[in-house]
Image (spheres, rainbow, N blue to C red):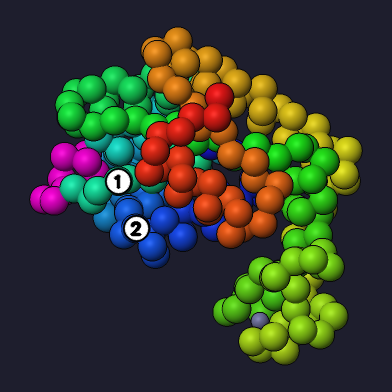
């Protein structure tokens, strides 16, 4: 768990690469179902067309269906950005008890102060070439900095800003995210689960090292 800009995607990609884990994206599952025009896909499309959020039960059904349709289970599944609400957390807990009896659900929280995340997001730029869209950072100490200022390394197209947010608006949104996250954490902690806390203000390598230690020893920080 972690807000946008906390590095969830980067950490997930490293776990897939180094450990061979599977990254389950509910967004990709949704797109799959829409494309295949399944019953769930139709319900998702309807919600999107109405400008509504996809129902929590529909998402849980989709995840359940994915799990039961696997011939062989990966060693670990990363739920990236899911659950997002307390209801989703409850439904995930129940469905894992139903269909993955021997599984263990482990919670990892990537924590970064709202002002650091706001700075990260506000300094993101992306390639204006629709076929490229590579993402860069304007931060001086970032590994994702482009070689020439505001020019894409790959295709030499100009880079453009990604967020129209102001620093205050963004910090506010991140704080709302954290309040929501707290509800989810409370639910799982009340179920007797521990939460691994990782300081995500560190470099990618340090975050990955902390995560690896955690995954090997279940050395809970909080
Ligand atoms: Zn480009």
Give coordinates of residue 71: x percent, y percent: 11, 50
Q: Which mark is residue 33?
A: none
Give coordinates of residue 155: x percent, y percent: 66, 88
Residue 143 falls in which quadrant of the image?
bottom right
* Vertical position of residue 148 compared to residue 168: above or below: below
Please report the bounds of the magenta region as a residue range. 65-72
Q: Residue furthest top?
A: 190
Nearer mark to the viewer, of 2 and 1: 2
At a point 58% along the width and 50% down the height, the residue shown is: 207
Q: Nearer the viewer, residue 201 or 213?
A: 213
Q: Residue furthest left?
A: 71
Secondary structure beneath disc 1? Answer: loop
Of the image marks 2 and 1, the number of the one nearer the N terminus: 2
Q: Is residue 67 magenta?
A: yes
Left or right of 59, for residue 6: right
Asked if the residue under mark 1 is in contact with the one under mark 2, i.e. CB atoms within 8 Å, the reply is yes
Location of mark 2 (residue): 19
Q: Nearer the viewer, residue 198 or 167?
A: 198
Location of mark 1 (residue): 76
Residue 106 falls in which quadrant of the image?
top left
The answer to whether any part of residue 98 appears in the image is yes
Q: Is residue 98 magenta?
A: no
Residue 134 falls in which quadrant of the image?
bottom right
The answer to whether any part of residue 46 appears in the image is no
Q: Within the displayed image, which quadrant is ligand 1 positioned in?
A: bottom right
Using the numbered discs, state the Cα–Cα distance from disc 2 to disc 1 in whole angstroms.
9 Å
At a point 52% along the width and 52% down the height, the residue shown is: 209
At a point 82% along the width and 41% down the height, the residue shown is: 115
Left or right of 29, for residue 194: right
Q: Nearer the viewer, residue 11 or 217?
A: 217
């Amino acid at each position: 768990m972690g807000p946008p800009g906390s590095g969830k995607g980067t950490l997930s990609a490293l776990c897939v690469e180094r450990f061979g884990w599977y990254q389950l994206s509910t967004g990709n599952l949704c797109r799959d179902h829409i494309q295949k025009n399944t019953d769930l896909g139709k319900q998702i499309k309807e919600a999107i067309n109405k400008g509504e959020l996809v129902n929590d039960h529909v998402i849980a059904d989709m995840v359940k269906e994915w799990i039961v349709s696997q011939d062989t289970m990966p060693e670990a599944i990363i739920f990236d950005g899911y659950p997002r609400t307390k209801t989703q957390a409850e439904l995930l807990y129940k469905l894992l008890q139903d269909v993955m009896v021997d599984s263990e659900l482990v919670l990892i929280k990537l924590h970064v102060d709202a002002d650091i995340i706001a700075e990260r997001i506000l300094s993101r730029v992306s390639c204006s070439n629709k076929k490229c869209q590579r993402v860069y950072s304007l931060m001086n100490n970032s590994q994702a900095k482009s070689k020439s200022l505001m020019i894409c390394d790959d295709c030499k197209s100009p880079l453009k800003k990604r967020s129209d947010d102001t620093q205050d608006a963004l910090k506010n949104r991140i704080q709302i995210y954290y309040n929501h996250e707290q509800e989810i954490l409370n639910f799982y902690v009340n179920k007797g689960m521990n939460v691994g806390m990782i300081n995500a203000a560190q470099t990618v390598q340090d975050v990955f090292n902390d995560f690896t230690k955690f995954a090997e020893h279940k050395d809970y920080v909080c």
